[in-house]
Image (cartoon, helix red, strand yellow):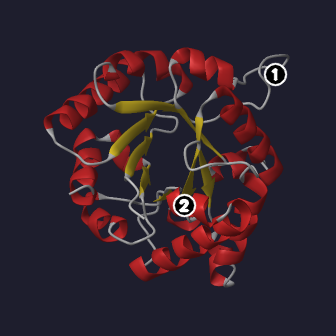
Amino acid sequence: MVRKKLIAGNWKMNCLSAEGSALAKDVATAVKNNKFDCDFLVCPPFTLLTTVKKCLRGSKISLGAQDVHFADKGAHTGDISSLMLKDLGCSHVIIGHSERRVDHFETDELVNKKAVAAHNTGIVTVICIGETGEQRDNGETIKVCESQIMGSVPDDATAKNTVIAYEPIWAIGTGKTPTAADVEEVHAAIRKTLAKKLGKATANKMRILYGGSVKPNNAAELLSLPDVDGALIGGASLKAEDFINIAKNACK
């Protein structure tokens, strides 16, 4: 099964207007100037969605948000709905990131509800899963990922509306990465779990991204693995050159 790679940038809580505009324009220009056989996605903070959308106009880069509420509207101060994201031009949204699960105590059940809301609005979800360092040391990596998939992914999810991102928490922003063999083992287990939940045909089509200290110098090895269908990039997505060099190494 050939799955087109997705190179996604999660800007997290970074960039003000001027910096975000410059970054988005640099990425858009670089993507236009290179013939990449892959898809691109950038997910800036809510405050920059409109600005970045304008900067990406005419490019083939999709716009995504970093979170969403499960309700369409109502008394939810500080939150944003999938309808609002759609209105701003978002086609994707990241949900269940470890930083949301830890900092905001988000559960698999909540992530699932957010995914359902996004899907009902026609927004593609990038559902994040991954283990802590302690869980990894205890040999619980695959068990944790299986549990998060079964709880976080809606029962009717499809390869068109869902992307899975495996991000070992201990590797995010630390410079540490699992070995290529470790990544492939986990991704293969994730696909097996998806097949159990959604059926083999859907699992074989669904993209599974790797995230966690992805850099230009390790992208080629990691993204050449059979079950790795792209990358969810954090810190390296804040530098257009690094982001594009990852794509160059991964989308040859």
Q: Amino acid at mark 2?
A: Glu
On screen, residue 29 above or below 180: above
The residue under label 1 is 76
- Residue 169 appears left or right of 179: right
Mark 1 neighbour density, 10 Å: few (under 14) some (14–19) many (20 or more) = few
Picture coordinates of residue 126, whole percent (x, y) = 57, 46
| Residue 68 visible in the current orientation | no
Q: Residue at x 38, y 61 (%)?
A: 2
Picture coordinates of residue 222, whole percent (x, y) = 36, 69
As rendered, which of 178 and 123 lies closer to the eye?
A: 123
Picture coordinates of residue 96, whole percent (x, y) = 67, 48
Picture coordinates of residue 191, whole percent (x, y) = 58, 68
The residue positioned farthest toward the front in the image shown: 201
Mark 1 or 2 closer to N-term? 1
As rendered, which of 114 and 218 lies closer to the eye?
A: 114
Q: How many marks?
A: 2
The residue under label 2 is 167
Q: Quadrant of the C terminus?
A: bottom left
- Residue 118 appears left or right of 178: right
As rendered, which of 188 and 71 lies closer to the eye?
A: 188
Mark 2 neighbour density, 10 Å: few (under 14) some (14–19) many (20 or more) = many
As rendered, which of 242 and 147 lies closer to the eye?
A: 147
Q: Secondary structure at mark 1?
A: loop
On screen, residue 235 above or below 16: below
Q: Quadrant of residue 69?
A: top right
- Residue 175 appears left or right of 240: right
Q: Quadrant of residue 213?
A: bottom left
Residues at marks 1 and 2, CA–CA distance in whole angstroms = 29 Å
